[in-house]
Each structure stands twice: as structure tokens, then as C-alpha cells.
Image: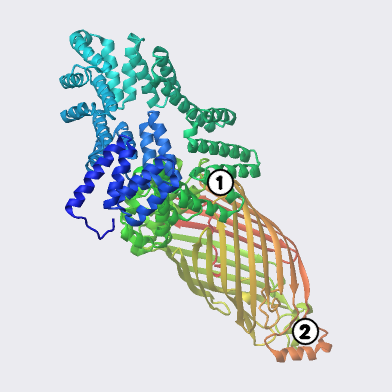
Amino acid sequence: MAANERPLDGQAQSIQSVEAQIVYWYERGRMDRVEDLIQQLERVQPNHPRVLELRAMIAWQQRQTEQARRYYNQLVENAPEHPATRRLREIVALDSEAQQAVGNAELLYLAGRYEEAVVEWRLAFPRAPENLDLAIQYWFAHARAGQADEAVAGLTQLRREQPNSVRLQLALIEVRFLQNQLTSDDYQNLARLSEDAVFGAQARALSLRIINFFGVETASVNDFIAVLEEKHPDHLEISEVAERSRQVVAATAELESDPAFQKLQRGLTYLANEQPLMAERWLRESYQERPDSVAAVSGLGYATMRQGRHAEALAWFRRAASMEPEVEQWQQMIEVTTFWRDFGLFGQHLNEGELRRAQIMFDRLQSHPDAENQVDLIANLDARLLRARAMAATEQGDNDSGHELLLEAYRREPSDPWLVATLVQSHEQREELELAAQRFAELIQHYPSDDAWFAYSLYLARNERDDDALAAILRVSENARSEAMLAHQERIQSRIDVRDFRQDWRRFLASNPNTLDDADTSTLATYISTMAADARASDRQYLRAIEQNMTRLDTENQAEGYAEASRFAEAVGDRSLAYQWAVRGIEVQRGDSESTSIWVSQESDDWRVPGLQSRARNLISSSEKVLYLGYEQRQKSGTPGITELNSKSVMIDLRVPFDSRSGYWFARVDPIWLDAGAADLDNTFWRNRFGTGLLCEEDCPEGIQPVRKDFGVAMGVGADYGDWWFDIGRSPVGFNRSDWIGGVGMRRSLGEFGVRLTASRRIQTATLISFASIEDPFSDRNWGAVTKNGIDLGASWDQGGRFGWWGNTGLDYYMGHQVEENWRWYAFTGGYVRAYSSEPFAVTVGLTTLFWGFDEDLSETTYGHGHYYSPEQYRSISVPITVFGRINRFSYLVRGSLGYSSTRLGEQIFFPTDATLQEIAQQNQEVTGVSPFFTAGTGGGRSHSLTGVFEYQINRHWYVGLRTELIRSDTFAPNQGLIYLRYHFGGYNLPVARPPDPPSRYVDR
């Protein structure tokens, strides 16, 4: 009927009357009467939806499927939302997956596995079906699965829509019987229907079941029996029931005293109420007293079958069949139970990897009488077996055969999501990524089950597509999500939260203030780490939220969580709390909150403990003033008065922590005495190559000159804020020449790497000329005091494991008073391995390479040269070996190094800053016999060095140390010695530094 047509009331009543008659005769199988009524209805409304539905149903029953589909398509076109269209769609247009689910549900129902049957029904019909046959089966399964109330409601609604259906009325009565809520109207209707020519037998059978279940002791049942006997006086079973009723009534007193009978009735009641475990208990007790009771034996069969113990159920049904061989029901139950026993054994053997036995069970299932009705299930089992064979082939290294078996399994069962998932992994291993994605796309498009969405979500998560993975798992219906699905959903949501948190954690916390409270311990540590990496003083407001969750990190060895929390607290200015958390992190890692000393390393310590110890120590150090006092001597051999240099230095280094933030400021005062020795100007070789001696012709100084000495005080102030630092000062004031020096730098972490960028101006301390400048003994000129002005980029990688790496590169500009300008490039790198590590003894072995070069070689001592080592190219490789440790109050470090270097020296004029002097030197070459050019050449060779540093803790405030260094090469042999004291104003009794912590001169910073 078209949507805009409205029949008259009389016509509507006539159509309803005809529809009622059609239902009446259709249920009774009188297709001749149905055909007459359909034709009558067609004359009134030829395209009425009910007419098309009936035509389609008749064609479907006669296996004229194409004709049925044509009627269905006509219905869809004329009345797409009519109930008749929806009912027919459930029969004609059901997809293969839904058809398989219906078949599985019917078989599961017969096996007594009602809850599983409900799951299959809901896979086929997320909403209850409207087709009467399907709806009755659907609601019967629900009723048997303990959902009788829902089943009654569903069937009652259908009854309102189809009030003339006798089948529906009987179904509703039976479900109310299962619900144990039969009414007097139900008994009256059942008695009336027992006389129906078609449905009378079904009504009488249901009546007898009700009587047998409730027994004849109940008054309402006795009244019902009397009505049935009056209506069917010649019906043998009813007459027998009536007679038994009378006998039972007479023997009620005796039966009530029979314990075996009471236990049997109790067990059967539990069985009817879907409590098979309790039913088995009472039925077994009844069976022990009456082993000849078929009711007890068959009841035990049903009770064990509903618990999934099919082998035991099979034994009970076989015993029931031997006791009542004429009862066909026991043979049917033997067949059903045998099938499900073999089905269970198939799965068991498959899970245990017993493929041969699984094949035997599969062959049995194929030959089972019900196998032809379970084509889809058998195909699924075949695919599972192929998949298991594929996995076995893959485990044996035959990936190609495994892949082919998976493809064959997929061709037989493309709807199995876990088979698809396994095949996709095989495609990924073969780098067939597009084909892998296509498999899941086809699965989701054609077979979108809950398991399919779950498998697809796992695939997406594995490929780091977290947003898509979350969207996929949310497609699983909420009431169908298993614990594994929910756990997967939580993991994906957690990963997304962590990702969003890392992008802008402040905004995330503003939108989700309970984030830290709701996070698990691992995610909490990640959140805190993210916050610590970007924390600033204004973030102190978040400190309380972290503090409230810290006790949760006491489990699962979350020492790194405490480390990150300590870093955050330090960044926001709470150094006391930062220290407490660093200490607690050590205790958590060790599993011992009562550790006698957090500073002493233990064998059980992992890589996190040294970092936490260092952080705790730094936090204490940054909260107390420290004073370094040192005395150092250096000796560099050479030509007295020209290339030789001896120095003595006193170091005074005061470090004072900031009150409001991490870091400290410092002040340096270093008195330095220089002694270059006395030059012998009668040595013509050096006289001609020192200052302007080559050009001196009259009144030239001769003989031993006065000792060249100088004294000055280097001074500097600065601050170190942890992530950046600066200093400014003077090279020794009092020297022949003093310059401003200083620097600024910053430190950052880039992933696992530490990065340092520095800009600085430093005095060159290697020689008297470069350090203090010098006066020319042959003229009134002076030159020297060279500063290096450069930018340095350094990087390092050290995760506390066995290996580490560092590297530096930069560019320097050299300048000085009356000294030629110069440029240097450099690239240094090295790696090291921790060969052995313990608290008292540790060994590291390294490999270091140095590459650098200058534009100009200004290494000489003539006027205009800076007298600092500046070859055109320098390359070296060395192997340093370091041994260090701490024993109680004593610590030490000994480093030895062997190396080899090669250099290239550039040609250079004598007087690079004065062209006139150079020209005179060249003109006088025949007179002096000296070429005023330093020739180019090569050099290098072997070198070795030895360094020792030792430190001892005197008391909680004072520490004393010693440092000595010897360097030997073919052209260079300096020595150095240092003794120092360190005073800690706070007196925290920190352990002696490991390795020792000697001071250095400010000018060498």
C-alpha cells in the first residue's frame, strides 16, 4: 500500500479479518485455504505488504528462493519500513555470518548450552527478530539461559502484534512455565487449546510436562488434570495421569517420608532453574539410593552436560538409553553429547599442539549425523586445524609452507578474525604491508563481529595507530567486551593520554585534573618524567598532586618515578623535597627503607642508583656553601727565559647556593706566580729566534739575563643554574698584561643525549708570552697575552650502562697584543666501556681521537707570534685506561694513556704583525745567515701520560686531596702537582667524592 493511501474503517476491518483467517489456516498448514484468502485480499489491496510476505514465505518453503527474493524486493520498494518487510528480511536477506550464528545457536540449544546459544542469537540479531519462527526460538533460548523475564516481555509484545497466533500463545505459556509463573488463564487456555485439531497434541504434551514438573500435589494442577480428563476421557496418557494423580494423592504421606524421592525432586527443581551444579549434588544422592531411577540418571546427564562435561554426560545418557531403549530422546541426546564431546576434544588437542589427535576428532565430527547441518561450523574447525598446522610449520622454520597453509585456511573461513590476524602477521613478516591492511579491511567490511573489531584494534595498536585502534575497540558492543578487550582498551587509552600529555601537559592537567590520581604506577612515572623535563618555578602548584601519589611508587620497583619527581621538585624550587624523593628512590630500588647508608654502593644496585645518589648529593651540595683551597705547581721544561715556564698557584674557590632556586654562584681569587728562568742571549740560535733579536745590530744585550718572573691575581665571579651558567673575570691582574675573560653556556637533554653549547673567552696559559705577555729585550716592544674566543658544541651519551660516548666540535678565534690573529677548527670524539664496576674498584677503557687545525702556525717566540701550539693540522688517537673507586673515607683515580699523533706544520714568517721588520730581516739574510722563515714540516710520534688523584674525608666538614700529572711525548714533557682542601659549611657528612673532585684554576675553566 502506498504511503499516502488511507483505507476506510470498514475496509481496514475487512483486511484485518482476512489477515486473522490467513494466520489461522497458515499455522494449520492449509495452504489451499490460505491461497483463497490471499486472492481475496489481493482483490482489495493487490500490493498489501502482508500479501507479498505470505507469497514470499510460501515460495521459500517450496525452495523457490529466487521467487521469494523477488517478492522481498517488491516489499522493500513499496513498504521498506513495514513489519512484514522486516520479518521477511530476517529469512530471505540474512547474511552468511548471521545464518551460521543461527545454526550454531540451534545446535547449542539442543546441547543445553543455553548461554552460548544466546550469544550466537545476538550475533545474528542484535535486536530481537520479528519473524515468528525465529522469535520463538530466540526467546526460548533466553528463557533457558535464565532470562525468562526478558523472554516473557518479548513474547508478550509479539502477542500484541499477532494476537491470532496459536503457536505464539503456546510459546508464551511454555516460557511462563519455565519462569514458574503460570496463571489460571494459562491453565484455561492450555485446556482449550488441547482440543485444537492441529495444536491439540502440542498443547496436551505441554500440559503433561507441566503436570509432571509440578506434581499432582498442587491443587491448581489437580483441577487442571480434572478439566483435561473431562475434555479427553479416552486419551490414554491423560487418563493415566489422572489415575496417577489419584494414586499420588493417596500416597502423598508415604512419598513425603521417602528421602530418595525428595532428593530427586530437589535436584530436578535445581535443573529446571538452571543450577546444574546444585542439581548434580542432589541427583547423585538420589541415584546412590535408587540406581534404577531413570529420572535420576537422565537428570545427571543433563546436569553434567550443562557444565560442559560432555564425556560424563554421554555415559549417563547411554545408561538412560539402556534402561529405556524405547525412548527416542535418549538416543538423540547421545548423538548431541557425542558431537560436543568430540568438539571439546578437538579444541583440547588443538590447544595442546596434538595435531594428529585433533585431526582424528575432526574426522569424527565430519562423519557425525548432524555434520551436514553444521557446514559452517565444520568449515571453521577445518580452518582452525589448517591454522594450527601453519603455526607448527612456521615454528619449524618453514615460513613459506606456513603462509600457504594460512592462505588455504583463510579461503575456507574468511570470517574468522583470529585466523585473519595470524595471516596478517605472516603478511607483515613477508613485508606485504598493503595486503595485510587489505585483509583486515575485507574482514571489517564483510564480517564486522565483536571479535573482528578486537583483532583489528590489536593490529592497529601494533602499528602505532592508537586513535584508530581506540575507535575500533569502541565498535565492540559494550556488554560484549571481555576482560581482555577492556584491558586492551585501557592500554590504548593510556598510550593516547601519555601522547597528549607529552604534547602539552599543563593544558592536559587543566582539562583532566585527576590524571595523576587515575594513572597506574608505570604511567604515573611517565607523567612525572614529562613534567620534570619541562618544569619551571611557576609549576609549583602541581607539586602537591605529585606528592599525594608518591606512595604508590613504593611498589613495582618504581625508583625512576622517584628520580623524576625529585627532578621536578628541584626545578620548581623545593630542594628539600627533591632530596627526600631521591633518597626514597634509592630505598625503593633496594627494597630496604632502613638502609644504613644511601651513599655506599651495593651489589644489588642497578643503573638507577648511581644517578639517584648523584642527584641526592648534588641537592645537598647545592644547599650548602663549599670552599675550595688549593696549591698547585706546574713545570714545563724548555729554554730558560724563552720557552720554559714554571708556575705556582693558590686557588680560593667559594660556592654559595641560591636560596630560591637550584644552582649556586661562585667567586674565585687565584694568586699566580710565573717563573720562566733566565735567558742566555749568547746562544745565537735562540737570540735570533726570540723577539726582534735577529735584527739587533748595536747595543744588543748579551749573556745571562735577569730571571723572567711575573705575579698576578686572577679573579672571577659567576653562577651555575644547572641548565645554563656564566662567569666573568680577569686574567691575573699584575701580569705584564691582563684581559677580561669569561663565558656563557647552556646544557640540555635531547632524548638520550646530553648537549652543551658554550661561548667563551679564555686566556692561553701554556707559555709566558701567551699567558702574561713579554717585553722584547732588544727593543721597547712587548707582545703576547693571547685569548681564545670561541663557540663549542658538545654532546654525550651515557645511560649508566656499559658503554658511553662524547664529542665536541667548535671554532676559535685567537687574538693578542701585537700578535697575529688566528683561527682554529676542531673535532674531538671518544667512546668508553665500563670493563668492571664496583664501589671500591672500577675500570673504564676508552678510545679518543682528536682532529684540529689552525689557519696560521704561530707557535714560535719571535715578535708577533703567540707562542701557543698551532700546527696547520693535528691528528691523534689514544687509549686511556682509568681505575677509580671509594673505600670508606678514601677515594682515588689513576689514569694512564698511550697515544700516537701526527702533525703538519705550516711555513711562517718571523714577524707576521710587522711587514717592515720582516722586510729588513729578509734584506739582512746574507749578513745574518738566518732565513727569516719558519719552514713547513711534519711531526708527531708516541706519547703517554699518567694521572693520579686521591681524596680523603677528614671529618664531616673537611676533605683533603692530592692530584699529580705527568705527560711525556717526543717534544713535550710537562709536570703538574696539586694539593687541596675542601670545606663543607653544612656538615652533611657526604661521602668522599667518587671519583675525587679536585679544583682547577679559574684561568683554566
- Please give the label number shown on residue 456: none
Give left or right: position of 190 versus 53: left
Position of residue 872 relative to residue 404, above or below, is: below
- For label 1, the crowd category at 10 Å Cα-Cα, with few meaning under 14, some 14 to 19 and many 20 or more, is many
User: Circle 2 — which element?
Assistant: loop
Q: Which residue sits at x=56%, y=42%?
A: 409
Q: How is the image coloured?
A: rainbow
Name the foreground residue: 16 vs 844. 16
**How far across and down, in percent of the image, does residue 951 sit?**
54, 52
**How far across and down, in percent of the image, does residue 89 sit?**
37, 48
**How far across and down, in percent of the image, does residue 602 sit?**
51, 41
If the image is split into quadrants, where does the C terminus sit? bottom right
Tell me which corner region of the image, top left, top right, bottom left or bottom right, holds residue 804.
bottom right
Cα–Cα span, label 2 and label 1: 82 Å
Check disc 1 and give the amino acid type. Leu
Tell me which corner region of the image, top left, top right, bottom left or bottom right, holds residue 116.
top left
**How far across and down, in percent of the image, does residue 200 sit?**
26, 27
- Please give the label number shown on residue 932: 2
If the image is split into quadrants, where does the N terminus sit? bottom left
Check disc 2 and give the amino acid type. Pro
Choose the circle earlier in sequence order: 2 or 1.
Answer: 1
- Please give the label number shown on residue 423: 1
Position of residue 435 relative to residue 365, above or below, is: below
